[in-house]
Amino acid sequence: MAEGIKNKVAIVGMGCTRFGEHWDRSAESLASEAFEEAIADAGIEKKDIDAAWFSSCFDEVNVGKSAIPLAGALKLPFIPITRVENFCASGTEAIRAASYAVASGACDVALALGVEKLKDIGYGGLPDFSQLRGIYNRQIFPNVTAPGQFAMLATRYFDRYGLSPEEGKRTLAKISSKSHANGALTPKAHLRRKVDVETIMNAPMIAWPLGLFDCCGVTEGSAAAIIVRAEDAKKFRKDPIYAKALQIAVSPEEEYRYQQWDGTHVETTYRCGVNAYKEAGVKNPREEISMMEVHDCFSITELVTYEDLQISPRGKAKEDIDAGFYDLDGKIPCQSDGGLKSFGHPIGASGIRMAYEVYKQLQGKCGERQIRDPHLGLTHNLGGFPANCVIGVTIWGNEL
Amino acid sequence: MNKFYKVNILDEEGGMDKVKGITAYGIYLPYHRLKRETIFKAMGWFNPGVGGLAKGEKAVANFDEDSLTMAVAAGMDCFPDIGREEIDALYLASTTFPYKERGNASIAAGALNLSANTRTAEFSGCLKSGTTALISALNASDSETTMVCASDTRLGKAGGTEEQMTGDGAAAVAVGSKGVIASLIDHYSISYDFPDHRRLDSDKFIRSWEERWMREAGYFKILPEAVNGLLARCGLQISDITKVVYAPPNLRDHKAMAQSLGIKPERVQSPLIEPVGNTGAAHPLVMLIAALEEAQPGDKILVASMGSGSDALLFEVTEEITKLKSRNKLKKNLDYKGELDNYTKYLSFKGMLEKEIGIRGEEVSPTSLSLQWRERNAVLKLVGAKCKVCGTPQFPAETVCINPECGAVGQMEEYSFSDKTGHLFTFTADHLAFTEDPPGLYGIVDFDEGGRYWFDITDCRLESLKVGQPVQMTFRRRYLDEARGIAGYFWKAMPFKG
């Protein structure tokens, strides 16, 4: 019987660059900044690191494949490093791998670092998807983009729950507006301005029914975590955060190939959440979780994630949104740093950035956006599309 | 009747009358219609002379269509009345085939999911190639069933007469000796190097000679020569013919031809210029199908083409025509339409307008042809699999069953989705993806007999889409990689046409 990762590992140091369009900086420079902050935060030196996991996703042309770009950038001295890639969930994958390594006793101090440098392609949005799932799928997949794939979730959700396009869009706009307000309070965020609901409602359409402000930005940046075994954590700092759950779930693609999925939720998130709560011993997430950083690549993703993580009942997220349940001063603040929407989404770094916000919140270091007395923080990282995705759900606590 | 009248041929088993003729038909007109007035408003400043032609509208192929996809659509339209397993040969006729080398008919045979044991051939080079293909099919051995698909997307230069007169469309007829709805009486052909229209390999646009010469020295001489030659061979008068179908260069000359040949107005088949335009090699067959849709058993229908000569064919309609499952195919195609109200959009669809497509649009990933060949069942035919254990249809075919309750390994049999209807599970309109006609529509389709997959959606507008609406599948050109010389085809969903 698997014991799970609960209370076996801890994060003792983290770093994160400002996220944004870094026209004048390379991936190497961003990774170096995140790394230096992380080791300084952990009070260690480069030579203390036994192994590293490096996450990057799209930007194989700029950053390059393999783990060599990380070793080269940081000048890590001949240690084992592995590049991991699992679409937008790559960052969580790096944390999970580093955690499993220290938990096994194979090494004592592990680094998880993610970086993404997307803005050298010459056009807006993510790089063209046509070959990401191989040359066969390029022949038979529709001409999709990420916003379109998530928009289909909104179409179906609106239809199922009887929301008019106006009502549905207004509900989604409240989610984005909340995240922009939080991002405005976050110094390292990409988009640091408040945006009101009407502006969001009236923004240009990207993929019906999602408009510009329903979509996160395309962002560059890097984030890093230093992971050690839980029993060693206090040797590094007085306020480490402890892993309660580190789960990954991957869709077998039945959602869009078999008539069972209802199209109004992300089944993989639900399954991953169930496993994470089980691993963490969380019985009632709505009461026990203090804060969440979810994968709000699009406003509709955040909405269905509330339900898939069993915080809001099915079809009832709107009521919680309208009640301010997920606002910074709500019961479970969601995206206290602005999330992907406002903090930004450098693909390979995002999962680690989510952990960065949970880490800082659980340590009480978030200044004017500080959540009152949080104990348990959850991250939700989604790679792929609603109908076929990789989901990472992690739960962290500030007590053993 | 003369010696060529092909009746009372005994088959091998003896006794049964066996007559070669048309056994089924299908038609395809593209969704978009461009009003000729729209063309004239855009180009009349340059050529006021075409103002007189600016009546009605023309059918315009969508950006994702070419003569090959339209031929397939017309062929698919035959299937309610004929089984694809009955077809021994496929003939394609067009002057606008996408490939010069790589069998267009082989691509079409694949898309139509015909047996690999199908004989394929292509007829091209002139506007009579559609009727020539039909004659060749009618002359094939009596045991053979041939599908003839004629299709064209001819292009006239901006502001010219040809731009006004041409339309895009396709027709298909199945020819055999079982269940003949219109039996061949006889045919007669004329071949002349009358160069009224021409295109070299490198020509995108039709070139033509002076209209008066084309009319006086060509149309009014050559077409009557074929028609009268056929009538003489059959020992018939024009007054014996119930419906005369002949190619129309334009409305006025078509009308004048009736007088010239002595045909009563009610016996002249409507030229379909006003609602469709001249669909080139397909047009005589499009008009023939229009005549068949209204015909009664016993009617005699004469059809004559025009282009580097002329073919004339005479058919007699049989009782079998009353057994066809559908006889309103032309009307269905005329009715399912959307106005292309923008001349520059037309130019763009036809590759006549260099647009700022952006760097995303300029990215064209290479196509692996070895993969296309290996996966031809999925890519060309939309053939997936059905699990022999749980019965779940699934696309594409894979080794392990997609049904999570089943998961059987290696228990798949081929299953065709191209002729299945479905319902739209969800959809979007994507403004970010590059497409020639933004926003790009796509969605997930639940097939009515099982199976789910996602597809691009074509031939409709976002405003018309609803969750749960019925859809059908259509074979389209997904991309044209001109740098590498590849037209890439796959299937899209479209609203159920009825």
Image: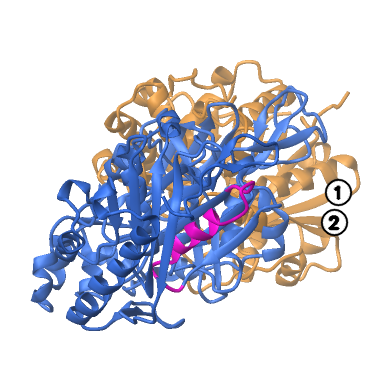
Chain colours: A orange, B blue
In this rendering, the count of numbered labels is: 2
Mark 1 Cα-neighbour bin, 10 Å: few <14, some 14–19, many ≥20:
some
Q: Is residue A76 above or below residue A296?
A: below
Q: Does the magenta stretch include residue B418?
A: no
Residue B143 sits inside the magenta stretch: yes
Q: Disc 1: which chain?
A: A
| Badge 1 amino acid | Asp
Kindly state the secondary structure of the residue where label 2 is placed. Answer: loop
Answer with the quarter of the image where residue B221 lies.
bottom left
Residue at 70% from the left image edge and 70% from the top image edge: A73
Q: Residue furthest right?
A: A106
Which amino acid type is shown beneath numbered disc 2?
Answer: Asp
Q: Sequence-wise, which precedes: disc 2 or disc 1?
A: 2
Q: Is residue A28 above or below residue B151?
A: below
Q: Name the residue under label 1.
A: A108
Asked whether the beta carbons under mark 2 and mark 1 sit within 8 Å of each other, the answer is yes
Front in this rendered view, residue B257 or A147: B257
* Residue hosting label 2: A50
Residue B379 location in percent, x, y?
A: 62, 52
Left or right for B227, reference A349: left
Query: Quarter holding the C terminus of chain B?
Result: top left
Residue situated in front as seen by the camera: A222 or A86: A86
Look at the image and give the residue range highlighted in magenta: B125-145
Q: In this view, does B91 lie to the left or right of B169?
A: right
Labels 2, 1: one chain: yes
Crowd around label 2: few <14 · some 14–19 · many ≥20 (10 Å): many
